[in-house]
Image (cartoon, rainbow, N blue to C red):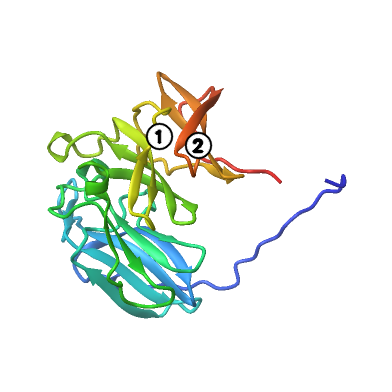
Amino acid sequence: MDGQIYTMECYLVRKVTKPVNELSTSDWPRLTGMTVSDNKIYITYYLTDETKKPSVTRYINKAYVAVYSYPELEYITTMEDERAAIAGSWNAYNGIFQTESGNMYTFSNTSIANGFTENSTKKAAFLHIPKGTTQFDDYYFDVETAARGLKPVHLQYLGNGKFFAQVSTLQSEEMTRWADKELKACIIDVKEKTVKDIPQIPVHDGDGSQRMSGVIENGCFYIPLATDGALYFYKVDINNATAERGAKVASNFVSATFKMN
């Protein structure tokens, strides 16, 4: 740094209000992810019946992606695919990810551990949307089978088709609603369709509604995880699927992690 102080100002230049009945006229849409690709905005979501308390998940065995123009936010279409279940989960924003090329992957975990009222009959899976299009292509990755019958719960995209994932070590019949526990760490490669365990990270519980918080630098992913009764940062080698335990954090959770240049 040159010793000077820099500031950045941001301005809200336009506000657009959209009716939710473009997505459903009877059920409540819960957004699970969003990305912009080639002048379109793609939104993954699922529907709940809010007349029931607690709310009931609707139409779980299908993936939904609403497509709008960007920045105008004019509704274009809703993409649906029955090869996979609901894309994403409540408050995690893990429904859709954009790669460096502008292509997109949707992720369906199908698990009641993520807050749904039932397990889907579909396997946890990734689907693919080419850049700027409004249709899924024929790509399908049964990540549950690749993970030896286990379901990924939380994801963060790392680049070059690889994800850091927390995968439940419980079978579907052992899971309960909102039970974000007994997770192992893995590297998922959607290009090679592989799942590799990271053995240096113990099985641990998740952060509940906290979104995954990590940073990438020089081929490594740095993420705080609660293991062995405390919170530690782990340095994950992305290509080798190995990790080292680092600094202990005096906190119950870390809500955000940033890299300062």
Residue 75, placed above or below residue 235: below
Of residues 236 and 152, the one nearer the viewer is 236
Q: Residue type at mark 2: give it.
A: Val
Write the residue at 54% across / 22% down: 248
Q: Residue type at mark 1: give it.
A: Ile
Of residues 207 and 232, the one nearer the viewer is 232
Contact between marks 2 and 1 (CB within 8 A): the answer is yes
The answer to whether residue 152 is visible is yes
Q: Position of residue 234 (x, y in %)?
A: 51, 31
The answer to whether residue 19 is visible is no
Q: Position of residue 188 (x, y in %)?
A: 38, 48
Write the residue at 29% across / 30% down: 182
Residue designated by label 2: 236
Residue designated by label 1: 198
39 left or right of 79 in image:
right
Q: Secondary structure at mark 2?
A: strand
Q: Position of residue 243 (x, y in %)?
A: 48, 32
What is the spatial separation of the Cα atoms under label 2 and label 1, in whole angstroms? 8 Å
Q: Position of residue 177 (x, y in %)?
A: 20, 39
Of residues 228 and 178, the one nearer the viewer is 228
